[in-house]
Amino acid sequence: MEAIERFALLRGLRAVLDAAGVTLASEEASREVTDALVAQYAGRWRMGTLWTDTFWESCKEAVRGLVLVASGPEARLARGGVGQTLVLAHPERPGELLVAPSTLFPAALFLRVPAAAAELQEALASLDPAASRPRTAVTRAFMGHSWEFSIPSPYSTDPVPAGPRELDRHFNFSPAATP
């Protein structure tokens, strides 16, 4: 993205970002993060997410043209970790911000919020590792039969049948789930 386009985008969002209490990203940091996101989806699927071709393409499309505009507070990640929250924007959608708990989180699942301080603060607060959380209910889902789908092997990244052991290992690497 040209510096002038980034400047225009930031000028329009500056009051919102300041009111939300986030740290504006430098031009260098913005370029590094956005280039890394694009490169991340140019490669092969990675562990922890049951990728499909459609979902992978959705993630590629989601990062195309995005600009890192700010860094938020730390976010709660899977396995008790914390990461740096990212606030991103797209020049063609100045009324929308995207909030990512980390670059490892699938881009198609970034939180989309209106470009308003209250909504941005609410989205960032939902990722706060220090916030108390009500106990969540166990969710059960039927994903299909093991012979109907596969997951990437951690050794070769080639698809392998998704049996119980493989699913357990796979989800232990998820950026969005706690083992």
Image: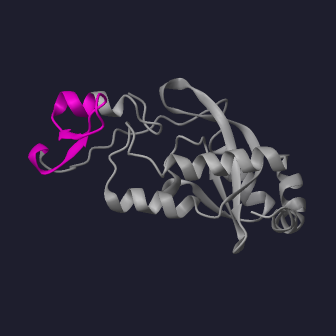
Residue 22 in sight in this render:
no
Measured as percent of width and height from the top left, residue 162 is found at 18, 39
Where residue 140 sits, quadrant-wise, is: top left
Residue nearest the observer in this picture, 20 or 170: 170
* Residue 105 pos. (x, y %): 52, 44
Residue 45 in the image: above or below residue 112: above
Residue 49 placement (x, y as % from top left):
37, 43
Residue 38 percent coordinates (x, y): 57, 53
Q: Work out whether residue 76 can be spotted.
A: yes
- Residue stretch in magenta: 146-168
Q: Residue furthest left?
A: 147
Check the image and report above or below for 73 versus 107. above
Q: Residue at x 75, y 43 (%)?
A: 72
Screen quadrant of the N terminus: bottom right
| Image position of 59 (left or right of 23) | left
Residue 157: in magenta span: yes
Question: Left or right: where does residue 38 sit relative to residue 175?
Answer: right
Q: How many numbered tags mark residues here?
A: 0
When the figure is inspected, residue 111 is found, relative to residue 156, above or below; the finding is below
Q: Residue at x 33, y 58 (%)?
A: 53
Q: How is the image coloured?
A: one colour
- Is 88 on the left or on the right of 174, as rendered? right
Residue at the spot x=68%, y=46% of the render? Answer: 33
Residue furthest to the top? 80
Residue at (73%, 56%) from the top-left corner? Answer: 120
Residue 121 in magenta stretch:
no
Q: Quadrant of the C terminus?
A: top left
Rendered view: 111 above or below 92: above
